[in-house]
Image: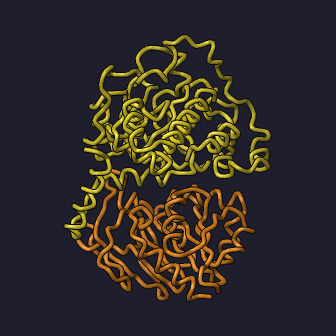
Amino acid sequence: MSTQNLESAAVTNTVENTTESTVGTARVKRGMAEQLKGGVIMDVVTPEQAKIAEDAGAVAVMALERVPADIRKDGGVARMSDPDMIDGIISAVSIPVMAKARIGHFVEAQVLQSLGVDYIDESEVLTPADEAHHIDKWAFTTPFVCGATNLGEALRRIAEGATMIRSKGEAGTGNVVEATRHMRQIRSDVKRLGTLDEAELFIAAKELRAPYDLVKEVATLGKLPVVLFTAGGIATPADAAMMMQLGAEGVFVGSGIFKSGDPAKRAQAIVKATTFHDDAETIAKVSRGLGEAMVGINLDDLSDNQRYAGRGW
Amino acid sequence: MSATPTIGVLALQGDVREHTHALERSGARVVTVRRPTELDTVDGLVVPGGESTTMWKLAEAFEVLEPLRKHIASGMPAYGSCAGMIMLADRIEDGVQGQKTIGGIDMTVRRNAFGRQVDSFEAGVTVTGVDGGPFDAVFIRAPWVESVGAGAHALGHVATGERAGRIVAVRQGALLATSFHPELTGDTRIHRLFVDMVKGHA
C-alpha cells in the first residue's frame, strides 16, 4: 500500500469513529518529526551526557552505547544498546529519546519500542543484521528514522514505513564532506523530478528504484514527503548551519559534541547556529572560544569497508 | 487594519512551515519571527509545536523572551499549539528545572501529560464556538491543561477513553491555545478563528 493510501486510510478510520482514539497513525509518526524541525538531536552515552544535551537546548537525544567515533576505533560488531542504559537516559531527561537498531534487526526494534523510546533509528552506524531486508517499519507504533545517500534510497525507506529521513554522511569522522554530498544529491534529485512530465516520472521511478506514487508525490511537493535531517560528520556550528542552508530541516550531531573539548558550550553553539543558520554574524559569535573540536578523519584515510554510508541500499 | 493581517510565526524551533501554510490558507500574511525587532511588525503571533525547553532556551539566549512577554501583556493576540500552549501558560508542571514561559493565559499546563510517542494519538475533539463537527485532533507527546483560572475558558475536552474530560483547548481574550496540532491536518478552522481574532482585535 502506498503511504498516501495508508495515510488516508488512517484518517477515514478516525473520522468514522470520532469517539475512538488511535495511536501509531502515519500523521502521528510524521507529525512527531515535524515537531523536531529546526532542532539538534545529540548522541549521548550516559544519563549525565543526556542532561548536558537537554540543558544545551537539544530537541531530542540519541541513546547509544558508544558514539560512532568509538565504534570506529574499537571495531567489532556494534549492536543495540543495553536496555538499562536506555532506561537510565529516558529517566534522566524529559525531551524525546531516540535509539538505534541494526539495519534489518526487527527484534532490536521491538525491544526499543517496548522500552518506550520515541523514535527508532535503523542505522548504518551499527553492524547490519540483514543484508537483503530493512525492517518493515509499518508494523510498529514507534516511528522510524533512516539514513539515505540519495532520493531513491530515501523513498525506499519511506515505502518501508520510515517517517523521517537523515543524510547518512560518514558518522564518526567529524568530517562534513559526505553529509554535504548526500544533502546536495537529495536536493538535486528532488529538483530534477520537478522538471519531468508525467511520462518521464514513470522512468524516473524505475531509475530511482522507488515506488511511482512516492516519486509523483515528491515531484508535486518539491520536497520529501517526510522531514529531512542531516547527519554524519557535523562537528561545528558552521557545519550545522551549512547543512541547514543546503536544505536540511534539522541536525543530528554524533561524536562531534562529546568528543570535543567543551561539550556543553559546543552543544549550545550548534543549537544556536541551527536556528540562525542564515545569519553569519550569529554563527561567528557562537563559534568563538569553543575549545578543541574533535580531531576528525580524512575520508581518503578510510578504506571502503570502513565506510558506513555503503551499508543499506 | 487592512483586510489582510500580518501574523508572525515564532521561528526558533518547531513546525513553523505547517503553521505558515495554515495561516496563509486562512487569509493572513505570514512572516517568521526570531528577533525582537521582527515582533514589532506583526498584528498577531503563533507559537508553533516543537520542544518547549528548546524554545525557552533560545528565546532567552537571543533576548526575545522579555519582548514577547511585553507584547502579549499589552494585548497582542497569540495562538499556541502543543509546545506553543506550554509557552503561553502562566504556570507549568513537569517542566525542566527553571523552565520559563511567555505566559499570558491564566492556566496550569502539564508538559508531556499524555505520555511518550508510543502514546501519541488521534481523537475527536469538539471545540466550543467552532462549527463543522469535531476536530480530528492529532496529539504528539502532548500537554494537557490541569486547571484554568478565572479569566480563561476551556473550549475543548477529550471526549472518551481514559483521558476523557482533559482540557485540550483554551481561550483567554485574544489568546488561544490547543494541546493538539490542527496545522498537521489540513483543517484550518482553528487558524481561521485566530485570524478572525487578530482582525477583531485591531
Q: Chain A is drawn in which colour?
A: yellow
Q: Can residue A236 be seen in this view?
A: yes
| Spot occupied by residue A222 in the image (x, y as percentages of width and height) | 50, 48
| Spot occupied by residue A201 in the image (x, y as percentages of width and height) | 40, 40
Quadrant of the rendered structure where residue B9 is? bottom right
Q: In the rendered view, how is the structure colored?
A: by chain
Would you say B10 lies left or right of A193 here? right
Depth check, front residue: B97 or A69 = A69
Q: Quick one: quadrant of the N terminus of chain B? A: bottom right
Would you say A223 lies left or right of B129 here? right
What's the residue at 59%, 88% (across, down)? B201
What's the residue at 42%, 52% (across, down)? A32
Q: Colour of chain B?
A: orange
Q: What is the number of callouts on the image?
A: 0
| Spot occupied by residue A65 in the image (x, y as percentages of width and height) | 46, 29
Quadrant of the rendered structure where residue B200 is? bottom right
Q: Is residue A86 visible?
A: no
Depth check, front residue: A276 or B71 = A276
What's the residue at 45%, 33% (across, down)? A147
Would you say B159 lies left or right of B104 here? left
Q: Quick one: quadrant of the C terminus of chain B? A: bottom right
Depth check, front residue: B64 or B90 = B64
| Spot occupied by residue A47 in the image (x, y as percentages of width and height) | 49, 40
Residue A113 against residue B113 in the figure, above or below? above
